[in-house]
Amino acid sequence: MKSFMPRIEITLSQIQDNARVLTELYGKKGISLMGVTKAVLGEPSIVRAMIEGGVKFIADSRIENIQKMKDAGITTQFVLLRTPLSHAESVVKYADISLNTEIETLKKLSYYATMNSKIHQVIIMVELGDLREGVLPCDLSQFVRKTLSLHYIKIVGIGCNLACYGGVKPDTRNMQKLSELVDSIEKEFHIDLEIISGGNSANYEWYKSDQDIGRINSLRLGESILLGCETQNREAIPDLHTHAFQLIAEVIESKKKPSLPSGEICQDAFGNTPTIQDRGIHQRVIIALGRQDIQLSSLKSKNKLEMLGSSSDHIILDGKNNNLQVGDEVTFDMNYCGLLAAMTSPFIRKKFVNLNELAAA
């Protein structure tokens, strides 16, 4: 019986292998890992694969995903990567640690933590140039002082985020700056910070090239574990699997047609005026995926098919010499953006490989 279409086939053993290799690699210099699960909606089977691979913390940006993982019986330290003020009660209830940059949010967390007599741990994020979230270094001391005054809030770490919004790469300079800030805060307030979170999957090149990692002892890794690559240049990391997620779609039309539309050209369904190359009469293949599921630019055809374009519900391919027929399958690799979209789409089924083996581990 044919599997549901379209679908993502997820090889759990490869995710577990990637987590193990990265845990051992970074562990050589005393860095532990947080496995970031936001791209896979906190899918419990994938989370278990990360944990079996040695990941000590699970981090997600949605409290709903953390709740789902806990409801599935996963026991680990959960870290919330994004802390909306309106979710403060749920954050205290479900997350062990949260990343924070606003005193008003911390006050709300303190309120609910006090009501529940539950210590909530926080990592304060500092701005080191990427201009996403973070307290400015010049304001960090005062921010820490105010945070320490809050009941049932415990500062367990300092962190930074790079190579996300601004594309600023982690390097010796900004990692050293983070270490210096940690030393300064510990000395000024006579506290010991357990977690110094230096960044994410973009930190691989810094780690490989810098012998002195300073105070950095934690990284938040999603793409490296899931797709096997670093994120400065999207190069594969040695010994990692890069095909743990395969997107498979069904051919729903395969016909020889002209390559140029006929008639007066206006805007397409998305407000663009198409410019289309004349290829003469050729085999045009349509598959059951569209922009509602995933962006064309995030896909790479395993069948080496050229992607001509897409609409809401269809992707059009140049069939060339592949002789694809209706009902055949076409397989794609995805980048991180594609994985995020495809895992979120309710119209793409998720099929797990090695599920029984992992459950028995």
Image (cartoon, helix red, strand yellow):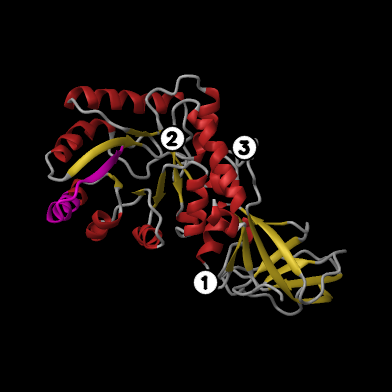
- Please state which amino acid type lies under the numbered disc 2: Ser
User: Residue at the top extreme?
Assistant: 211
- Residue drawn at 59 percent across, 55 percent down: 357
Q: CA distance from mark 3 to mark 2?
A: 18 Å
N-terminal of the two: label 1 or label 3? 3
Q: CA distance from mark 2 to mark 1?
A: 33 Å
- Please state which amino acid type lies under the numbered disc 1: Pro
Q: Which mark is residue 2?
A: none
Q: Which residue is mark 1?
A: 346
- Please state which amino acid type lies under the numbered disc 3: Ile
Count neighbours of disc 1 (C-alpha within 10 A) and say few if under 14, some if 14 to 19, many if 20 or more: few
Report helix, strand or loop for mark 3.
loop
| Image location of residue 245, percent across then percent down | 62, 56
Image: magenta residue range: 107-125
- Residue drawn at 62 percent across, 75 percent down: 313
Q: Nearer the viewer, mark 2 or mark 1?
A: 2
User: Residue at the bottom extreme?
Assistant: 263
| Label pair 2/1, CB-CB below 8 angstroms | no
N-terminal of the two: label 3 or label 2? 2
- Residue drawn at 46 percent across, 32 percent down: 170
Count neighbours of disc 3 (C-alpha within 10 A) and say few if under 14, some if 14 to 19, many if 20 or more: some
Q: Which residue is mark 2?
A: 32
Q: Which mark is residue 237?
A: 3
Figure check: 295 above or below 23: below
Between 327 and 181, the residue placed more toward the observer is 327
N-terminal of the two: label 2 or label 1? 2
Q: Is residue 286 left or right of residue 159?
A: right
Between 72 and 330, the residue placed more toward the observer is 72
User: Residue at the front extreme?
Assistant: 360
Asked where in the image residue 260 lies, by quadrant, the reply is: bottom right
